[in-house]
Amino acid sequence: MNGKFRWLKQVSVVLAGLLGWQLATAQISPDSQKRYTTAVKQVQTGDYERAKSDLNVLIQQRGPLAPYASYYYAIASFRQKNFNQSRLMLKQLMEMFPDWRKRDDVSYLFAANAMELGQYEEAMTALQTIGDPAFRSDITKLEQNFLPRITDLNRLKQLNKSCPNDRIIGLSLIDLIQRTASDKDDLELSDRLTNRFGVPPAASLQPVATTSQTATAGPRPAIQPSRNSRSKGYYNVAVMFPFRVDDFNADKRLRTNQYVYDLYDGIKMAKAKLQEEGITVNLFAYDLDNDANKALELINSPAFAQTDLIIGPLYVEPNRIASAYANQNNILLLNPIATSSELVANQPMSFLAQPSMSQQAQKVAEQVQSLNGSRRAAIYFGTTRKDSLLAAAYQAELKRQNYQVIDFRKIGGTAQTMADAMQFAGSTMASRSANTTTQPVSITLGHVFFASGNDDDGARMLEALSRRRVTGTLIATASAFDFYKTPLSTFSRRDLYLLYPDFIDPLREPVSAFQEEYAAKRNTIPSVFASEGYDMMLFFGRQLAKNGLPLRNRSSLRSDTDDYLLSGFDYTQSNDNQIVPIVKYEDGRFVKVN
């Protein structure tokens, strides 16, 4: 187990040891012990604010638990990416308890915060105070992750001057000089450093795992032996889903996690398809719920070292741990259903099977431009967080393109409630009394955007716009409509486009063939999750066979065949899927227009 967090991973054992050491010098009240134990568990489970509140009480008491509480407070802040707060708490800890026996742990976390803040000189100063040799491996990984990011040659030269024996600084400086410098003195410096430290390997200075992920995950998994980059005929795929097999009942079809089994069924069918193409995929299913410790246990197991592709995990904390491992070991990681671009930001080996919300917003804005309408728009959204996030992303995109957003608000309820909630500058609201009714004035907009996951809201929005006499195109999320009970005539009532990331055209031959095969095997029609599982495994299995690991050709990271069930994949520009279908009802069917 790595040195810096070996006392953090197993809380129950460690806590007994720490308290035993403290009791030799001072009596700890039962209330303080309970508060400390609870706070530590809250840190581990991600309940950081509550943990910090309890820890702060212990810090203020200045008792024997204060340094430990301060350190856990700093860890909680670090995991929240509040690096400055974490740094200040550690600084206070070092000032108040300069002889604390966990001083090296403090110095390491202080350096990690400083690295995240770009304060590399302060970070290196802190690292040089660490005396425990068990930290050496972790210090090297920390430096490898951050020091190659320095692009200021003079700054890196000064760091080399301050730390002349640091090999990572030396290799980073050699690399930067070779890439950017032409000055004779710099080139001579590069030669001297090369004679001392050697030539930096092509991949040695790439970031291995962000420090924030490491603090979240506890100890880093050990680096596995470098992988052969050539293509091979078989690939090991780890599927890390919350199968919850202990609660599984084969006779129960409507499970809360049924989508997980549907995804996996699709993945298994793609495995068979890949085998027909001469690509052998070995599937390894891991039952992983929202359990960070189990995620660590799995990725550190010897068998996991042979993994080529990770699908999942679906929860944030386990996903961060798996992402760090994937980056460190050049393993692809695929998020099957997430739409947050934050999951792949600065994560070169992590991909979203779905388009991110920002990607969806960009594609909708591109479609709007093709309509050549007015640059006045209104944006409405439903009651879920996903609705509001998509609406906010679209608002930001329109503002970036100098559109005028005249109304932006959450909306819901009946069609009349929606209509009454709409506010347009200079318009007259409908006024109803016993004797008179004032009709609203006509409102002309270029378009209205509506994001909602309530499948009753779409038809209500169409009615609300009619009641307010709003003219202009409506672009709505497909999830705002129930396609089984909504009359098809509804989709022809105005110029209507649907943002439909999981659109499947049932008339395409690959779709009908898949549905027939799935029904024959499972005795039910496939859900959209089954289709998504099939597509993602088929695409990434082909990419592994074509490009090997690490993926070498970014321009080829797109689907080039028409046998996918949905609309395919495109990762040539970013690690979220750039394919965002927008459909329109024409001639009795929905067709893609972008």
Image (cartoon, rainbow, N blue to C red):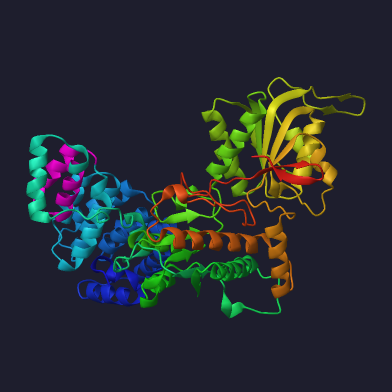
On screen, residue 276 above or below 440: below
On screen, residue 501 above or below 245: above
Q: Which of the image's four quarters has the N terminus?
A: bottom left
Residue extending farthest right: 435
In the image shown, does 459 or 558 lie closer to the viewer?
558
- Return the x and y of residue 149 as percentages of the image width and height: 27, 45
- Return the x and y of residue 52 as percentages of the image width and height: 38, 57
Res. 46 visible in picture: no
In the visual, does 543 lie left or right of 507?
left
Q: Is residue 319 magenta?
A: no
In the visual, does 200 lie left or right of 35?
left
In the image shown, does 317 or 40 lie closer to the viewer?
317
On screen, residue 559 above or below 472: below
Q: Which of the image's four quarters has the C terminus?
A: top right
Q: Residue at x 12, y 41 (%)?
A: 158
The quadrant where residue 230 appears: bottom left
Res. 554 visible in picture: yes
Residues in magenta?
A: 151-177
Q: Residue at x 82, y 32 (%)?
A: 467
Q: Residue at x 55, y 62 (%)?
A: 538
- Return the x and y of residue 55 as percentages of the image width and height: 35, 60
Q: Residue at x 81, y 27 (%)?
A: 430
The quadrant where residue 299 appears: bottom left
For the image, the number of numbered tags is 0
- Return the x and y of residue 443 as percentages of the image width and height: 75, 24
Q: Is residue 152 magenta?
A: yes
Characterize the magenta stretch by its predominant secondary structure. Answer: helix
The quadrant where residue 580 appears: top right
